[in-house]
Image: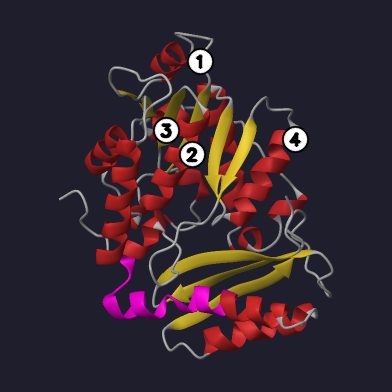
Amino acid sequence: MMFEGLGTQAISLLQTRMRCLRARPLKHPSITMQISETIADIRQSRWANPNLSWGLVPTMGFLHAGHLSLVERARQENDRVGVSIFVNPTQFNEAKDLEVYPRDMARDLTLLKEAGVDLVWTPEPETVYPPNYQTHVEVEEVTQLLEGAARPGHFRGVTTVVAKLFNVFQPNRAYFGQKDAQQVAVIKQMVRDLNVNLDVVVCPIARDHDGLALSSRNSNLSPEAREQATCLYRALTAAQTTFAQGERNAEAIHLTIIDLIASTPLARLDYVSVANPVTLIELETITDQALLSMAVFVDNTRLIDNMIIGVVRK
């Protein structure tokens, strides 16, 4: 079934997103959605009409409403939309985590076709990393903290595959979700440093009805764990309330989050951060903006979430 593995509320949100996508007219509709595993096919389709703009949505598949919100944004801003589906082995620290990562290619392709996507790249690992592959892209300082500290080598895998995706598709714009806040910061740094000729577009976190950030990993949660997983969002909103009440000491904000996570039986904190949103350096006092972020094991599933608090920038 198309929605197997998703909760009732997530299914409802996904169906709503699909209805919205069907109702929105395409700028320059293509006849069919092309699917290919080869780089040559992707490049041929991309440059068939050089006058059309392209948006790229990189994914690892098992799509949810958050992914489709990126597709919708890309459709609004470009003539054509490309999507990649590739579970990138080089960004996983544990072989078991890679093995159990949820996959459903047939369902993903159905969703993307419904969403009006023009081009989908579904490469095999041997296509992305052929024999004797030796080149990697590594961003330094901003990858050493948070997820980078918890998952050594993770971001080298991310930046390498994203650089390859940019090179294969050569899009005008690439779309990422704010849920992976450090990934966004790392990719923006890479784009600046390497003078990559595209715009990185960051879209808001898509959440379920109770605030849980949508993630492919949510399908691994038991009913009890799924209920308790809302502790991440509740901790962020508690910290936001503390800030709104006048607290500017980062440690106090930090402790607000820790206390709420600690009170959740199935939750185990991996890390929590109150940092500069660009550099990810930990703050002592919040004078402008702060990125609140955390990783939490709920039962055996590792989840991440974040929120930016402080001065609203236009």
The amino acid at mark 3 is Val
Residue 187, image x and y in percent?
A: 65, 42
Badge 3: residue crowd in 10 Å (few <14, some 14–19, many ≥20): many
The amino acid sitting under disc 4 is: Arg
Q: Mark 1 sits on what residue?
A: 52
Given residues 77 and 197, the one toward you in this image is 77
Task: Examine the rendering and report whether any part of residue 136 can be seen.
Answer: no
Between 79 and 167, the one lying in front of the other is 79
Q: Is residue 281 above or below residue 57?
A: below
Above or below: residue 119 compared with residue 311: above
Coordinates of residue 63 in the picture (x, y in percent): 35, 47
Q: Classify mark 4: residues with Cα within 10 Å, few (<14), some (14-19) or many (20+).
A: few
3D distance between C-alphas at marks 3 and 1: 16 Å
**Viewer-proximal residue among 11 and 36:** 11
Which type of secondary structure does the marked residue at label 3 adopt? strand
Magenta-colored stretch includes residue 225: yes
Q: Is residue 68 visible?
A: yes
Q: Position of residue 260 (x, y in %)?
A: 55, 86
Mark 1 crowd level (few <14, some 14–19, many ≥20, 10 Å Cα): few
What is the three-letter code of the residue carrying label 1? Leu
Q: Which of pointers 2 and 4 lies earlier in the amino acid sequence?
A: 2
Tell me: residue 242, above or below residue 99.
below
Q: Residue at x 35, y 51 (%)?
A: 64
- Find residue 235 and report its image quarter: bottom right
The residue carrying mark 2 is 73
Q: Confirm or deny contact between disc 2 and disc 4 (CB under 8 A).
A: no
Q: Are marks 2 and 1 in contact (CB under 8 Å)?
A: no
Per the image, label 1 sits on a secondary structure element best described as loop
Image-quadrant location for residue 118: top left
Tell me the number on the disc at residue 83.
Answer: 3
